[in-house]
Image (spheres, helix red, strand yellow):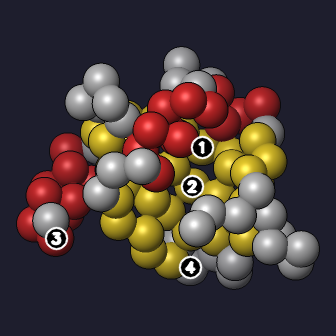
Amino acid sequence: MVAELVYTSSAFRHGYTQDDLQEMLQSRYIQVRSQRGLSDVYEIFGRNFGGDYLHVVYRLLPDGHWRVFHIARMTPAHRRRYRSIL
């Protein structure tokens, strides 16, 4: 089960919405710790119902909420990694 989500304005900079993330979380996705080594930051790779390959970044807050600050299309490297794992 996913924790309550809190969004920053930067999460929507690339044109994706809360619905896109909700759809992605209802499908198969991959969750990993930040590739940049940031503390309490995680990345999610998956697809929305429209078939877009999405990359989401969030920080796990002390109260268990997720502060989502990035929702964008996967880069080619992200897409290769996602496909190789699934």
- Disc 2: which residue: 57
Number of numbered tags placed on the structure image: 4
Are dots 4 and 2 in contact, CB under 8 Å?
A: no
CA distance for labels 4 and 2: 12 Å
Label 2 crowd bin: few (<14), some (14–19), many (20+), radius 10 Å: many
Which of discs 4 and 1 lies nearer the camera? The answer is: 1
Which of discs 3 and 1 lies nearer the camera? The answer is: 3
Q: Residue at x 60, y 43 (%)?
A: 70
Question: Which x, y percent locates residue 13?
Answer: 62, 25
Q: Which mark is residue 70?
A: 1
Along the polypeptide, which appears first: circle 3 or circle 4? 4
Three-letter code for the amino acid on which mark 3 is drawn: Ile
Q: The residue tagged with tag 3: helix, strand or loop?
A: helix
CA distance for labels 1 and 2: 5 Å
Q: Residue at x 32, y 30 (%)?
A: 49
Are dots 1 and 2 in contact, CB under 8 Å?
A: yes
Are dots 3 and 4 in contact, CB under 8 Å?
A: no
CA distance for labels 4 and 1: 16 Å
Q: Which mark is residue 37?
A: 4
- Disc 3: which residue: 85
CA distance for labels 2 and 3: 18 Å
CA distance for labels 3 and 4: 21 Å
Three-letter code for the amino acid on which mark 1 is drawn: His
Visible residue check, residue 36: no
Q: Work out which quarter of the rendered image holds the C terminus and state it.
A: bottom left
Q: Nearer the viewer, residue 11 or 51?
A: 51
Three-letter code for the amino acid on which mark 4 is drawn: Gly
Question: Which x, y percent locates residue 1?
Answer: 58, 68
- Above or below 66: residue 17: above
